[in-house]
Image: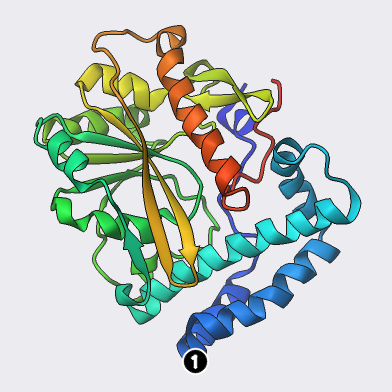
Amino acid sequence: MTKKEARQWTSRSIGSAFQHKIFYVLIRIGGWRLAYLVLYFVALYYVLFRPSVRKRCGYYLSHRFPGQVGLQRLKSCYQLSLELGKVLIDRAVVGILGVDRMSASFDDKKILYDLISEGKGIIFLMAHVGSWQVALSALHFLKTPVNMVIHREEGDVDRHYFEHRSLEWPYRIIDPEGFLGGTLEMTDALKKGEILCMMGDRLFGNLKNTLSIRFLGEDALFPFSAMKIASTSGAPVVVLLPFKTGPTGYGLRLARVIRVPEGLGRTGDHFLPYMEEYVRALEDFTMEYPFQFFNFYDMWKRF
């Protein structure tokens, strides 16, 4: 099975570059308020007249709200689409109008200070929830270089916030489709005591690097690469989950600190207890913030 066959999700926006530019203009004219106002109608259009949108929302919603049908499901699909749109607008607001237009709070600074002082770096294991780009601004107090594992697909028109004003990239990008999956760059960053940010909720690459873990009532596939790197480097894994608290506010939750024993090898079963901790944290998050989880593909598909 090829990587493309295994990876069913896409990072490309359903909107065109022109549609994105319209929202960028709205933000410049009237800030987040005007952009949100238009978003309510745009999201409604997509939910009502784009069956593909309802299908993509349905994978997650059918597991999070298994009893919903008809208008209830349609309403949830609209809420989920609306929250995603707000997150994308917030990201653009930060880039176009400045980081001071959005606030991000974090209450566990001492924990991170202590972990970074160990000198082995930190792996931030995140997920496609809230807006990680806005929330990470709450971590500037660490004054530590940040490395992001990101694969950007060809044709993706979504802009990172710093691309709106040609700002210097605030973190180093590691492409998981690079040489050896970027593993050498990741371990090198941790050896320097730096921060490595990874997403743990989407399948990427070979199926042999995934574990089947129960999530929202059914087994889903999760990659365990972060745990394997933690075992090799000795770096702690910190589960960070950002969430939207209001029109201009975000919070950042430190959901778990996971210590993976060194030298566990490469067999996935050795990493199962540690990945289960991550999945339980993610499941708890969806219980509290059901419309801030943005995986629009069938995580539960059997290959």
Q: Position of residue 11 (x, y in %)?
A: 55, 50
Number of numbered labels in the structure image = 1
Q: Is residue 193 above or below residue 43?
A: above
Q: Position of residue 199 (x, y in %)?
A: 43, 39
Residue 136 sits in quarter: bottom left
Q: Is residue 28 above or below residue 107?
A: below
Residue located at (49% from left, 83% from top): 27
Quarter of the image with the N terminus is top right
Q: Residues within 10 Å of mark 1 (few under 14, many from 20)?
A: few
Specify the farthest residue to the right: 70
- The residue identified by callout 1 is 29
Quarter of the image with the C terminus is top right
The colour scheme of the drawn protein is rainbow
The answer to whether one can see residue 167 in this image is yes
Q: Position of residue 110 (x, y in %)?
A: 17, 43
Specify the farthest residue to the bottom: 29
Q: Nearer the viewer, residue 81 or 171?
A: 81
Q: Is residue 290 above or below residue 199?
A: below
Q: Position of residue 241 (x, y in %)?
A: 42, 45
Residue located at (33% from left, 67% from top): 162
Q: Nearer the viewer, residue 4 or 168?
A: 168
SS class of the residue under badge 1? Answer: helix
Residue type at tag 1: Ile
Q: Is residue 258 left or right of residue 292?
A: left
The answer to whether one can see residue 205 in this image is no
Residue located at (31% from left, 72% from top): 99
